[in-house]
């Protein structure tokens, strides 16, 4: 079950704090937030997908289209920032068809992917994106949740699901997003025996990491999102909101 941690918001003497934190809007239930997001015209997302999506063209002329995956769910929440209500929605789609280095003809045999695995690593690649809508059902900001590819991984990590979203608390106007992903540590690679029927032959393909996304506004009130990899380093293994908060506090991020 997805869990959301609420950030208390206090008003003293009828006056709101000078520096209002990003917080969940408790007056709008997740169910109502989901209904709101579902009512957003598809054109709001279609334009972004058309510009940033990456269809894949096979050698035989077939094309694999780009669409939002059904993997991420229950990410529709209402948030308050500086007195304004925003709605979140996290979905994944293929944003890149660049072959990983392991698909290069120059890749060493122990780091190479077979042709079929190269195609699969591209077609199945998906990058989660945080979409934010305003109260007029307009898409006002998008932040890709980027998972880097370390040297020991031969194919790009692919975002699979979101497990929790919450205010960062210790970081002003920060949102924490716990996500799971899979990578080539469970992909059949060249030279490996992939015919085993034993479940023990493959490790659990799901790994978890937590993203820190900072919310800010310019002088005109336009919303901007930024993934902060300095406070939460890429490919961290924080699987809970509380664990990520403790890490941020220990590091002195604010």
Image (cartoon, grey):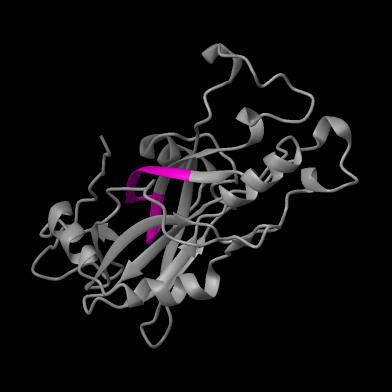
Residue shown at 17%/53% (left/top)? 30
- Regarding residue 21, the answer to whether it shows in the image is no
Residue 26 vs 40, above or below: the answer is above
Is residue 173 found inside the magenta-colored segment of the image? yes
Q: Residue furthest front?
A: 60
Q: Position of residue 222 (x, y in %)?
A: 39, 81
Q: Image height check: is 83 above or below 31?
A: below
Residue 254, image x and y in percent? 46, 55
Q: Main secondary structure of the magenta part?
A: strand
Depth check: 197 or 229 in front?
197
Quadrant in the picture for residue 44: bottom left
Residue 127 in sight in this render? yes
Q: Residue at x 54, y 43 (%)?
A: 251
**Residue 238, x across and y down, in percent:** 48, 35
Q: Nearer the viewer, residue 229 or 94?
A: 94
Residue at the bottom extreme, as displayed = 220
Per the rendered image, the range of residues in magenta is 160-176
Q: Camera-side residue: 135 or 252?
A: 135
Image quadrant assignment for residue 34: bottom left
Compare residues 231 and 163 and report the one nearer the observer. 163
The residue at 22%/73% (across/down) is 83
């Amino acid at each position: 079950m997805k869990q959301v941690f609420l950030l208390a918001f206090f008003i003293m003497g009828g006056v709101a704090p000078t520096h209002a934190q990003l917080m969940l809007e408790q007056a709008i239930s997740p169910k109502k937030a989901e209904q709101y997001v579902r009512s957003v015209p598809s054109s709001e997302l279609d334009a972004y997908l058309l510009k940033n999506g990456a269809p894949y063209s096979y050698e035989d002329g077939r094309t694999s289209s780009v669409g939002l995956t059904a993997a991420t769910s229950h990410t529709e929440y209402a948030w308050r920032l500086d007195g304004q209500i925003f709605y979140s929605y996290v979905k994944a789609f293929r944003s890149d068809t660049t072959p990983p280095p392991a698909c290069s003809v120059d890749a060493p045999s122990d780091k190479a992917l077979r042709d079929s695995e190269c195609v699969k690593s591209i077609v199945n690649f998906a990058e989660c994106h945080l979409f934010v809508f305003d109260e007029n059902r307009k898409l006002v900001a998008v932040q890709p949740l980027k998972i880097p590819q370390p040297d020991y991984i031969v194919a790009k990590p692919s975002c699979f699901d979101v497990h929790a979203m919450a205010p960062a608390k210790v970081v002003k106007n920060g949102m924490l997003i716990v996500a799971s992903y899979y990578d080539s540590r469970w992909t059949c690679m060249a030279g490996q025996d992939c015919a085993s029927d034993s479940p023990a032959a493959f490790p659990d393909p799901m790994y978890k990491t937590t993203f820190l996304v900072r919310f800010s506004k310019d002088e005109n009130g336009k919303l901007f999102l930024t993934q902060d990899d300095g406070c939460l380093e890429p490919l961290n293994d924080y699987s809970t909101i509380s664990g990520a908060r403790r890490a941020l506090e220990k590091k002195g991020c604010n």
